[in-house]
Amino acid sequence: MHDDGRYDDPRVNRSEGPGSGVDPVSRETDHQQGWTTGGQPTIRPPEHDSGVRREPPAVGAARPVPESYVLPPSVPSGPDGRPVNAPDDRVATSVRRNAGASSRFEAPVHGNTPPVPAQPHPGAVPDAVTMVGAPGPGAVDAADAAYVSRETPTREEDDPPLAMEAMRAVQILNPSGEVTMPRPERTRVMCVANQKGGVGKTTTTVNLAVALALHGNRVLVVDLDPQGNASTGLNVPHHTGVPDVYDCLIDSVPLAEVAQEVEGIPNLWCVPATIDLAGAEIELVSVVARESRLNRAIEAYPGHFDYVFIDCPPSLGLLTVNALVAAQEVLIPIQCEYYALEGLNQLINNINLVRQHLNPKLAVSTILLTMYDRRTRLADAVEQDVRNHFGDKVLQAVIPRNVRVSEAPSYGQSVMTYDPGSRGATSYFEAAQEIAERGAKEPVNRNA
């Protein structure tokens, strides 16, 4: 090496210029070296010296070792026969680039030479590995990593969300009209009751009825709440002057003359409730057999139903007592909050009183957890308490908080028809299927 920093070797002399056909090597850059069997130092030539384009090797294959070139004798060597500026060991470094950040590492330095940040290959992809020195088996450097396709799937992708939602919608709507849910041997009269308001009694009644009707069951919904929300959810007229359940309780009008067929849902009928029902509690006080008026109306119905759902008001008055006397089973929706548990014991006590004195065949058959919020520990605690206390009576299906369930009544629909692919519709469909399967396996009349 001369005093002006030039080497005698023209291969590493910068004065040759770009057009000379040689590859200038900086004094601050380590040689990419290998070793011959004879112990003489060798160096890998640049790929463009030969003028022949190299095809990239297959991904994962070992990179072929190029032919060895013995360094010219003019390059000074140390006592061990290695170039004076060669590193002590063959170095393998990895260039790993993370998203949003650039990875830097320092190349091996010798003497007082300052560190030089390594520059990744222009075409390298993340996690490309650059091997310095003779490549080992299976090594792929940055130049070869550039040829790795980024479109190669790393794992088996699931179906797109829209495709999954469409599949659920078709399953729930059941356009073929086939009977996919088992029909019970005899009519199941289910009373949906809870004196706590806002736990999802009406929503549960409407969506379970629609789900069962869409899958081949004949269903009747009796709206026994003066607010008439079940009638609204099924888009059944319930304004003043429309024959309703009040006429059945007070004037003994046959239920067949009051029931209305639900538009767009085959096999589903609804007995609406108007504001007149608000005064039925007072008028029933002086009526003979006031607790069994609804039971007589349902038994006198000429047609046959697989399910009769009675939507109760949020109270324990005479209307709720009429529903408990007419029903065989009680379905209790429980909101996953503490207030919903507080009045549950009182409801169970009243059900036991009705069974002892008025309806011996009444039983609590189904518990449904509603408005479940998986983000809170309270919901998990309420679920565990309810399952530990009621056991198998609690459905495995849990109704989550879902805005589609709340939006559906404003369009006069259930969530099953408003957005059949939503989580709310899927959960109610699973609950209805579970109720149907339990009814087919177990006897309808059973003691609690």
Image: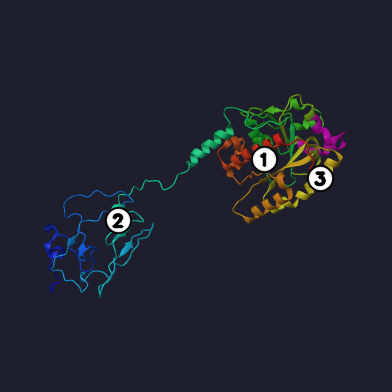
- Residue 10 higher or lower than 424, as above or below: below
Question: Can you give x and y, in whole percent of width and height, for residue 100 in the image?
Answer: 38, 58
The residue indicated by pointer 2 is 142
Q: CA distance from mark 2 to mark 3?
A: 77 Å
Prevailing SS of the magenta stretch: helix
Relative to 202, 13 lies left or right: left
Badge 3 marks a residue whose secondary structure is helix
- Residue 298 higher or lower than 379, as above or below: above
The residue indicated by pointer 1 is 204
Question: Can you give x and y, in whole percent of width and height, for residue 282 in the image?
Answer: 83, 39
Amino acid type of the residue that numbered disc 2 sits on in the rendered structure = Ala
Q: Split into 4 quadrants, where in the image is the C terminus? A: top right
Amino acid type of the residue that numbered disc 3 sits on in the rendered structure = Asn
Residues drawn in magenta: 277-297
Query: Mark 3 or mark 2, which is nearer the start of the sequence?
Result: 2
Residue 109 occupies quadrant: bottom left
Badge 1 marks a residue whose secondary structure is helix
Question: Can you give x and y, in whole percent of width and height, for residue 338 in the image?
Answer: 70, 53
Query: Mark 1 or mark 2, which is nearer the start of the sequence?
Result: 2
In magenta segment, residue 428:
no
- Residue 224 appears in the rendering: no
* Color style of the picture: rainbow
Q: CA distance from mark 3 to mark 1?
A: 21 Å
Report crowding for label 3: few under 14, some 14 to 19, many 20 or more residues within 10 A (C-alpha): some
The residue indicated by pointer 3 is 350
Residue 315 occupies quadrant: top right
